[in-house]
Amino acid sequence: MTINASRPRIVIEPPGPKAREWIERDKKLLSTSLTRTAPLVPEETEYIWIKDVDGNIYMDFGSGIAVVNVGHRHPKVVKAIKEVVDELDHTNSCDFYNYLQVIYGERLTRLVPGNFHKRIFYGNSGTESVECALKAVRWHSPGKPYIIGFVPGFHGRTFGSVAFTTTKLTARRRFFPFMGGAVHVPFPNTYRCPFKGLEGDDCVEAVLSYMEDFLFKHVVPPDEVAGLIIEPILGAGGIVPAPERFMRELKRMSKDYGFYMIIDEVQTGFARTGKMFAIEYYGIEPDVMTLAKAGANGLPFGPCVARAELLEWDPDAHENTLGANPVVISAALAVLDVIEEEKLPERAAELGDYFMRRLRELMDKHEEIGDVRGKGLMIGVEFVKDRETKAPNKELRNKVIEEAFKRGLIILGSGTSALRIQPPLVIKKGHIDIAVEILDEAIKVAKS
């Protein structure tokens, strides 16, 4: 199947009759905990296109939440999956060996920053990768019960990871008690600082002072901290890059106090930000890196890469059945090939700069856009009621998403009132221009 399109094409106002039928059946059957951004029922995907069951064609600028970095159904990924299925389907790596996992692990551990020996554990998702990281750090830190996370961070929804997920109360309500020892620190969002009245460098200094002068002197003995976990760019928290000084100081604290630094690259990894991994912008070598999403371009995949000693623990201390089976790991190997051959980190950096320039042109036209930020093709567009007060404008943001969808552009929300724009990294510049055109029209209609 091939989707023949140069721009979105809406042939019937969504949701069409076929989509409505599937949506009604879904409502009777699936968990009501699933949030839905738009009434989209896909039938076919290719490159940046999604064709729905009624024949509408959309540009996917969400990439399934930063998953299809190499585009939908990239030919090399499809070929790799088909070839391995003719030879292997599943053998569990907790009982046996999988040579494809060795090949992939040798490649990935060379790419992850850190001039030291590394090991890898294969899970099935971002939350599983985070669970592995939390357990490994705890296992190797007897007598150190605390792990520090940052608000608002997103690290998953299983009981360990959700202890550090603080983007929305809905993810935490009725689930207490979580994993013990979770300690929360405000993330230094220099646009909208958690400490009112501060911005920029002053915000960073306030958070650092909170940690050193309050947390570590009155609440948590720093020598009892096993580790910290942080996203180098908040994903669900609003697409907010961590300030460079803040990240360097966290690394300094980890050395001074002897705790591990877990970098969550579940959303930022695999070339999304203009580097293979976002932490490369900071020149920091993480002790542990959690990965998932784009690694296998949509197949269940959640590798955790760490200093070798952290993944040297007792047999049976941590295992799973399905992690990186031959089909998944073959897709993941193909993804690495595409990233390298098509120079996707460089492409994401170049196109990201262009996209943000075009979005700042929109900012000049629409006072309701308070900020455009990000790295590479991980971009946040913040909507406000007033640029001076920076009061969030969630209602307008949601209307913009809705109006863009009606015109064939898929974008997602993030944080309180930001758009989360994350197209496939193989996108052409002309399609960015079309997206800006649609966004301009969507904003005009949404605020009218």
Image (tube, rainbow, N blue to C red):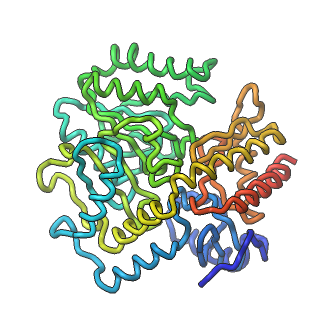
- At 63% across and 71% down in the image, what residue appears? 50
Q: Can residue 168 be seen in this view?
A: no
Q: In which quarter of the image is residue 120?
A: bottom left
x and y, in percent, of residue 150 in the image? 44, 33
Up/down of 113 relative to 149, above or below: below
Which quadrant of the structure image shows residue 426? bottom right
Relative to 398, 79 lies left or right: left
Q: Residue at x 54, y 57 (%)?
A: 65
Q: Residue at x 78, y 43 (%)?
A: 361
Residue visible at 28% across and 26% down in the picture: 255
Which of the two residues, 154 or 49, is positioned nearer the viewer here? 49
Residue 314 shown left or right of residue 92 in the figure: left
Give the camera-side residue of 285 and 147: 285
Whether 309 is drawn above or below 399: the answer is: above
Percent x, y of residue 384? 73, 36
Q: Where does the image place residue 154, in percent across and percent down from the top left?
A: 47, 44
